[in-house]
Image: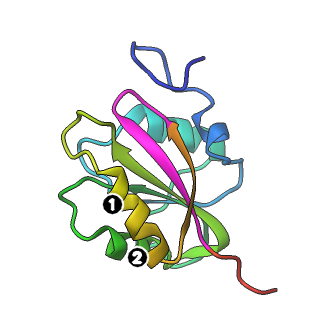
Amino acid sequence: MSSTVGDSAPVTGTGDRLGLRPGMVVQELGWDNDTDDELRIAVEDCIDADMVDGDYGNVVDAVLLWWRADDGDLVDGLVDALTDLVGGGSIWLLTPKVGRPGTVDPSDVTEAAPIAGLSQTTTAAVSKDWQAIRLVAPKTPA
């Protein structure tokens, strides 16, 4: 199945493509009425649980951060997303695709990630309107 949804086909395998597995704790930040519900369901199906929110208060394996151009300072958003993330965990920055309302300029991500202490590794089209950018936090010493 295609990674983008241009028709009414369900988003399948998205959680797998994001490196998510059953039992992982995934925190969702930046949810709003424009987020992709099919993508959210696919992630929850993959981890076999509901995503947690910013009030979770424990470590998480991954963060889905929905971000739009008018959401404020991206560095601040990324630093906030690191709060509960386990060392070596991933932040999947979900931004509207080019041409959609709220599109984030790729150079903004390229500049913000290292300031927040993150490395950009992968970009993937995950739905009709959203793309995902994987940002990796440094691993904590054992």
Residue 108 tag number: 1
Q: Amino acid at mark 2?
A: Asp
Residue 111 lies in quadrant: bottom left
Q: Amino acid at mark 1?
A: Asp
Q: What is the residue that sits farthest to the bottom in this orientation?
A: 141
Q: Please give left or right for residue 108 compared with residue 4 in the image.
A: left
Asked if residue 63 is positioned above or below residue 55 in the image, the reply reads: above
Q: Position of residue 91 (x, y in %)?
A: 53, 61
Secondary structure of the residue carrying numbered label 1 = helix
Residue 48: in sight, yes or no?
no
Q: Position of residue 63 (x, y in %)?
A: 51, 61
Q: CA distance from mark 2 to mark 1?
A: 17 Å
Residue 99 lies in quadrant: top left
* Dot placed on the residue nearer the N-terminal end, 2 or 1: 2
In-front residue for pair 81/125: 125
Image quadrant holding the N terminus, namely top right
Q: What is the residue that sits farthest to the right in this orientation?
A: 142
The answer to if 112 sits in the magenta stretch is: no
**Which residue is located at x 63 percent, y 30 percent?**
13
Q: Please give left or right for residue 127 compared with residue 58 in the image.
A: left
Q: Which residue has dot 2 on it? A: 80
Q: Position of residue 90 (x, y in %)?
A: 60, 62
**Which residue is located at x 18 percent, y 40 percent?**
101
Bounds of the magenta segment? 125-137
Image quadrant holding the C terminus, namely bottom right
Of helix, strand and loop, which mostly describes the magenta segment?
strand
Residue 79 lies in quadrant: bottom left
The answer to if 126 sits in the magenta stretch is: yes
Crowd class of label 2 (few under 14; some 14 to 19; many from 20; radius 10 Å): some
Residue 66 tag number: none
Q: Please give left or right for residue 72 compared with residue 23 in the image.
A: left
